[in-house]
Amino acid sequence: MTPAQLTRFEARLRAERADAEQRLAEFDDAMTAVRIARSDATADDEHDPEGPTMTQEWSQRSAVLADVRAELADVQHALARIADGSYGVCSNCGKRITVARLDARPTAELCIDCARHVR
């Protein structure tokens, strides 16, 4: 991988990190709103046929929040690999991960061959 390609991946990962951090903050705010609504003893949404219950809302938002946290962790791990010089090297076999694979999935830790065996 050329230094220019590495710089491009680092910039892309930094942008993805900023986006994930923003989404995480937004979902944290939304979760706080749902938490407050769930604690309101007068909120009788369980009998509202027009919309989802607070429990459903909580469950859906919790799942999305977990996904965003996992995405952020992957991006931070990829940035750490750039910093320590191991970015673009398969963590399983030690071979280079192709630029095409990193273009498709910049947080990839495995080359395509090792990723196929993991599935």
Image (cartoon, helix red, strand yellow):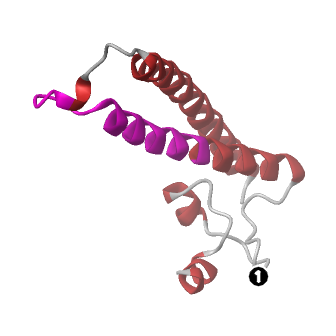
Q: Look at the magenta stretch and give its main secondary structure.
A: helix
Near-viewer residue (61 or 112)? 61
Q: Residues within 10 Å of mark 1 (few under 14, many from 20)?
A: few
Residue 34: x and y, percent? 42, 22
**Furthest residue in direction right, as rendered:** 84
In the image, the segment drawn in magenta is 47-70
Q: Is residue 32 magenta?
A: no
**Residue at point 49% right, 58% down?**
104
Quadrant housing residue 97: bottom right
Quarter holding the N terminus is bottom right
Up the image or down, 72 lies above or below 110; here it is above
- Is residue 54 in the magenta section? yes
Q: Quadrant of residue 98?
A: bottom right
- Looking at the image, residue 39 sits to the left or right of residue 74; the answer is left
Residue drawn at point x = 59 percent, y = 39 percent: 12
Under mark 1, the amino acid is Cys
Q: Position of residue 38 (x, y in %)?
A: 41, 23
Name the spot of residue 63 as percent of width and height, x first.
45, 45
Label 1 sits on residue: 93
Q: Is residue 59 left or right of residue 110?
A: left
Kindly indicate the quadrant of the structure image that contains residue 11: top right
In this view of the protein, which residue sits in the foreground, 64 or 91?
A: 64
Q: Residue furthest front?
A: 41
Q: Is residue 53 left or right of residue 3?
A: left
